[in-house]
Image (cartoon, grey):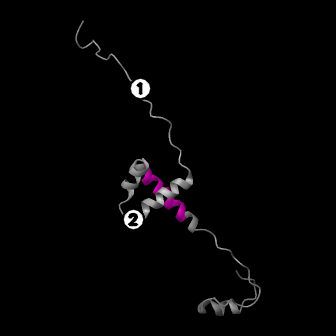
């Protein structure tokens, strides 16, 4: 037999790493807020909770995207019946005073 065809592998050991951890949304938010409390706390916070730094950064991006998404949205509109509303700008006030139509 040639030496390059002989296998020296006698034993193969499989290490069980356990189940994947599942983090609730509340736990993720708490960890992200902790990492945002001071600059340069991403790596330290990730080590404290046994996370990879990249996973924590992914959570932070998702948290920031959700925060900006929830801050932008529709504003409640009310249809006014009478004269111009007090908060109408002076330039548009003269145009709305002559109109008897309903305004938002």
Q: Residues within 10 Å of mark 1 (few under 14, many from 20)?
A: few
Image height check: is 91 above or below 12?
A: below
Circle 1 residue: 14
Please give the name of the residue rendered at 39% of the width and 65% of the height, measured from the top-left corner: 38
Please give the name of the residue rendered at 43% of the width and 62% of the height, measured from the top-left corner: 36
Please give the name of the residue rendered at 41% of the width and 29% of the height, measured from the top-left corner: 15
The spot of residue 43 in percent (x, y) is 36, 54
Label 2, secondary structure: give it: loop
Image height check: is 95 above or below 43?
A: below
Quadrant of image for the N terminus: top left
Q: Residues within 10 Å of mark 2 (few under 14, many from 20)?
A: few
The spot of residue 95 in percent (x, y) is 66, 90
Residue sitting at the far left: 3
Circle 2 residue: 38
Label 1, secondary structure: give it: loop
- Does residue 21 belong to the magenta stretch? no
Q: Quadrant of residue 17?
A: top left
Relative to the observer, which residue lies in front, 16 or 102?
16
- Does residue 65 belong to the magenta stretch? yes
User: Do tag 1 and tag 2 residues touch (Cβ < 8 Å)?
Assistant: no
The spot of residue 10 in percent (x, y) is 33, 16
* Label 1 to label 2: alpha-carbon separation: 41 Å
Image height check: is 2 above or below 98?
A: above
Tell me the chief SS of the magenta region.
helix
């Amino acid at each position: 037999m040639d030496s390059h065809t002989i296998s020296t592998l006698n034993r193969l050991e499989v290490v069980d790493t356990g189940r994947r951890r599942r983090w609730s949304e509340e736990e993720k938010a708490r960890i992200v807020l902790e990492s945002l409390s001071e600059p340069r706390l991403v790596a330290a916070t990730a080590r404290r909770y046994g996370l990879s730094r990249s996973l924590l950064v992914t959570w932070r991006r998702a948290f920031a995207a959700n925060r900006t998404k929830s801050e932008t949205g529709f504003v409640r509109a009310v249809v006014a019946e009478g004269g111009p509303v007090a908060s109408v700008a002076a330039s548009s006030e003269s145009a709305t005073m002559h109109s008897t139509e309903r305004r938002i």
